Amino acid sequence: MQPRPASERREELVALYREARSCTRCPLWQGRTQVVFGNGNADADLMFVGEAPGFHEDQQGIPFVGRAGQLLDELLGGIGLTRADVFVANVLKSRPPGNRDPEPDEIEACKPYLYKQVELIEPKVVCTLGNFATKLLTRSSRGIRSVHGRPQIHELGGRRVRIYPICHPAAALRTPAVKAELQEDFARLPELLAQPSLDEPAPVPAVAVPP
């Protein structure tokens, strides 16, 4: 499959944002201040997927702007990246009341937006933050504690992608031991990003030609 130009994919991403901005697929639209679609580099090799917007995200329309977002920025800095190098989104695009957990019908309603984002951004690695993003994108019921730091390969948006589950930064704010795990898991990201895209053809091994 021929890669699509980044400019073309960006245009479609903007169109998807406009569609999401007026979305009424689930009741969460009634209580939101604005849709939190996602932000960052629309041609990023690394994409992060969290759970749902909180109060500050709902007010600003940008994901991960609270304390968890500050920790995410710190962790990115530790591997030589900034928020401008990656794309950050959530499973839900609207804030659940009282920051409660996403419900199955809400996840189902928002899922097409996330899958389309992955298809248009074409990341090499999708980092799932916490249980909800991990279970959705790995199509598994296994919790984050048993799979964090272990890359998996799945098809998303018509492409094979490395999914890398790690703990949500909000959990690290509550538990120092989780923060140490998160730093260790982040330290493996550069190696994952250095690997060729799964859709690139494998190199043909050299064959010795007799004289």
Image (tube, rainbow, N blue to C red):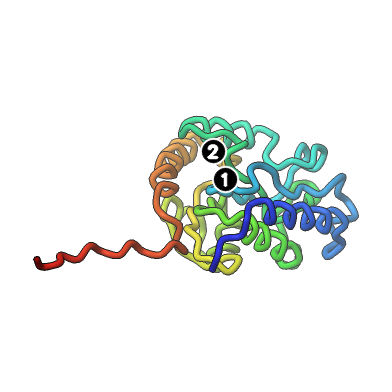
Rendered image quadrant of residue 209: bottom left
Determine the residue located farthest toward the left in the rendered image. 211
Q: Is residue 183 visible?
A: yes
Q: Amino acid at mark 2?
A: Ala
The x, y position of residue 36, in whole percent, is 77, 47
Q: Front-most of 172 and 84?
A: 84
The image shows residue 125 at horizontal and vertical percentages of 50, 53
* Residue at image point 77% right, 52% down: 14
Three-letter amino acid code at the position of disc 1: His
Quarter of the image that includes the N terminus = bottom right
At 58% from the left edge and 47% from the top edge, which residue is drawn?
44
Q: Residue at x 86, y 49 (%)?
A: 32
Where is mark 2, residue-wise? 172
Residue 202 lies, in percent from the top left, at 36, 64
> Local crowd at mark 1 within 10 Å, few (<14), some, or many (≥20)?
many
The residue to which callout 1 is attached is: 168
Q: Pointer 2: residues within 10 angstroms few (<14), some, or many (20+)?
A: some
Mark number displayed over residue 150? none
Above or below for 208 versus 6? below
Q: Residue furthest front?
A: 211
Q: Nearer the viewer, residue 131 or 93?
A: 93
Compare residues 112 and 196 and report the one nearer the observer.
Answer: 196
**In the rendered image, which quarter contains the C terminus?**
bottom left
Is disc 1 in contact with disc 2, using a CB cutoff of under 8 Å?
yes
